[in-house]
Amino acid sequence: MIVNYTEQGWEIITQRAHGLLAVQTAMEWRIKDRPDRWAETVAAIAEHDDAQTELEENDLLTAQGGPVNFRMKTFEAEHCRRLQDFSLSKSSYIALLCSMHMEFLHHKEAETNPEAKKFLAEQAKLRQAWRHELKITKKEANRIYGLMEWCDAFSLLLCQREIQPENRNIEVSRGPDKKRYELVQKKNGLLSVKPWPFETRSFSLRVEYRVIPKLQFKDCDEFKEEFLKAMVKEKVWKMEK
């Protein structure tokens, strides 16, 4: 989950909600630059965090009793294998993209974590087999994953409140075409991306979140109870070229 500390308490955005925001972003991408297997690409972007289900987890709190932000987590073999199983049960194309995402997330950890190193080595062999079956080159797979990673990075910028004030830019990611894309808040308060990678000139994005005023929890069950009691709210961002 994505955790922001605010004056009102903990602002919580679930991993699945973040994934839904990422896919909303993908749905606005230039039509001429979308991959051929567009429906499966959209599904992979939407579901790349679906194995992370907060209400079924028991490692949601820090030692001090606060909620664990996703950046505090490290490689978890059970979670990664669950994501592999979920994605492969839909299609090997989705499994390929999700496997590439796990490589992106954990390749540095593999340098010091033998379990992560072994898992990612297995994934590399699977990706090679899937590319062969799908008749997709490694270069093309990287291009498609570049779009998925861009949408993920863009969603995280919004969810983590990283929009810069005073018309300053912040880099999103290089994207599928290796260009530098930057997010900026315009003087009218609307958001824009330079260069503009989307099909339409304006659109809105939204994500659900909850604010929990209690700052410390005795255990995960108490946190889950407070999470379910919290009112569901919605953030909306307006985008304009």
Image (spheres, rainbow, N blue to C red):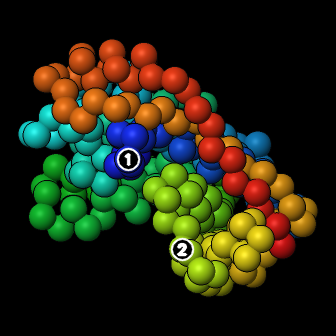
Is residue 176 found left or right of 16 in the rendered image? right
Percent of width and height locating residue 195: 75, 81
Please indicate whether residue 118 sits to the left or right of residue 206 in the image.
Answer: left
In the drawing, does residue 111 fall left or right of residue 46? left
Contact between labelled residues 2 and 1, with CB atoms less than 8 Å apart? no
Of 139 and 170, nearer the camera is 170
- Residue 80 location, x and y as percent? 34, 41
Compute the Cα span from label 1 to label 2.
Answer: 19 Å
Residue marked by disc 1 = 7
Q: Quadrant of the N terminus?
A: top left
Q: Position of residue 231 (x, y in %)?
A: 52, 23
**Local SS, label 1:** loop
Q: Residue at x 16, y 22 (%)?
A: 219
First in sequence, mark 1 or 2: give its number: 1
Local packing at callout 1 (Cα closer than 10 Å; few below 14, some 14-19, many 20+) is few
Placement of 217 over or under 130, stated as above or below: above
- Asked whether residue 180 appears in the rendered view, the answer is yes
The type of residue carrying mark 2 is Gln
Q: Quadrant of residue 198?
A: bottom right
Residue positioned 83% across, 55% down in the render: 203
Residue 136: quadrant of the picture: bottom right
Residue 149 shows in this picture: no
Q: Which residue is mark 2?
A: 164
Instruction: Judge depth for marks 1 and 2 and give the one in front.
Output: 1
Out of 96 and 136, give the one closest to the viewer: 96
Q: Nearer the viewer, residue 103 or 232?
A: 232
Residue in the image at 32% along x and 36% along y: 79
Look at the image and tell me in which quarter the C terminus lies: bottom right
| Amino acid type, callout 1 | Glu
Mark number for residue 179?
none
- Residue at 65%, 76% (x, y): give it: 184
Left or right: 240 in relation to 24: right
